[in-house]
Image (cartoon, helix red, strand yellow):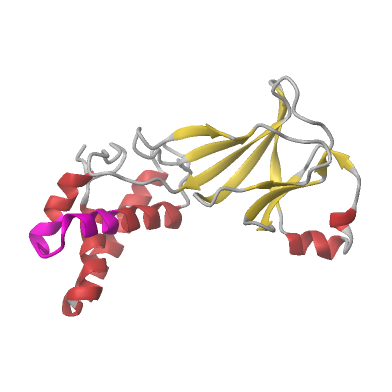
Amino acid sequence: MKTVDQVITRFRRHYPGCDAATALDLFQTAYKRLLDKAEFRTADVTLSSIVAGQREYDWAEADLRVYGVTWFTSADSFRALRPTSEDALRDRDPAWKESTSTGDPCAFYLAAGTSGVVIGFDQTPGTTTTGGYPYAVCHCEEHVAISGSTAIPFSMLDEMYFVYAMCEFWAYEEDVTKAALWERKRVAEESVQIEHLKKLAPGEETVILAPAVMFRTRVR
């Protein structure tokens, strides 16, 4: 499959006045928006240092979105946690955060902490990680810096979504008379790509893997 630099070269046939650095930034924006709109998971982030009695843990800004969390108590014992919010927990019990009850969590939430975003568990974990357990695996859409040599996944039909999206973004700044044209082309191509990527496995909704150099499991 083509590299990002090759896609940029095709885009610059339409807009040669766009420098390479700006074009790379446009590609990054297009890729990030495709992942977000299609809700594609691109990384599994493992929280491997659970502390008994600690409800909340720092959440990295690059982990843009979390679509699910799996809680492991052993190699053979794990379950998906239910997504919730501080508001929902507060509606259930105004004093929920002051509770000293601990155990295996059944839900997770994201919230603003004192120094950034945190991921929290309900109820508060009752066991400190020992011998590798318990731990939580968070299934995320993660921001990663893209370089010109990054390869587009073979699971993409072609590069035209990126070309049209980059043309659209540039046109809204420098060639507004053509912006609506590029937007129509981008929307049509986006629908084709998402439909394809969601149905890589017959009868199932599939999740795209990002380029091999970007997809990874990260532990913290």
Q: Nearer the viewer, residue 89 or 55?
A: 55
Residue at position x 37%, y 51% in the image: 194
Q: Tell me the quarter of the picture where residue 88 sits.
A: bottom right
Q: Quadrant of the C terminus?
A: top right
Q: Is residue 136 magenta?
A: no
Residue at position x 71%, y 55% in the image: 84
Residue at position x 21%, y 53% in the image: 160
Q: Is residue 215 left or right of residue 104?
A: left
| Residue 9 on image: x %, y % | 12, 51
| Residue 39 on image: x %, y % | 48, 51
Q: Is residue 23 left or right of residue 133?
A: left
Q: Is residue 15 left or right of residue 189?
A: left
| Residue 22 on image: x %, y % | 23, 59
Q: Is residue 19 magenta?
A: yes
Q: Tell me the quarter of the picture where residue 13 sits.
A: bottom left
Q: Tell me the quarter of the picture where residue 50 sits.
A: top right
The region drawn magenta spans 11-27
Instruction: Look at the magenta stretch and give its main secondary structure.
Output: helix
Residue sticking out furthest to the front: 115
Residue at position x 40%, y 45% in the image: 144
Q: Nearer the viewer, residue 116 or 6?
A: 116
Q: Is residue 214 above or below residue 29?
A: above
Q: Quadrant of the N terminus?
A: top left
Q: Nearer the viewer, residue 121 or 145?
A: 145
Label total for image: 0
| Residue 58 on image: x %, y % | 65, 47
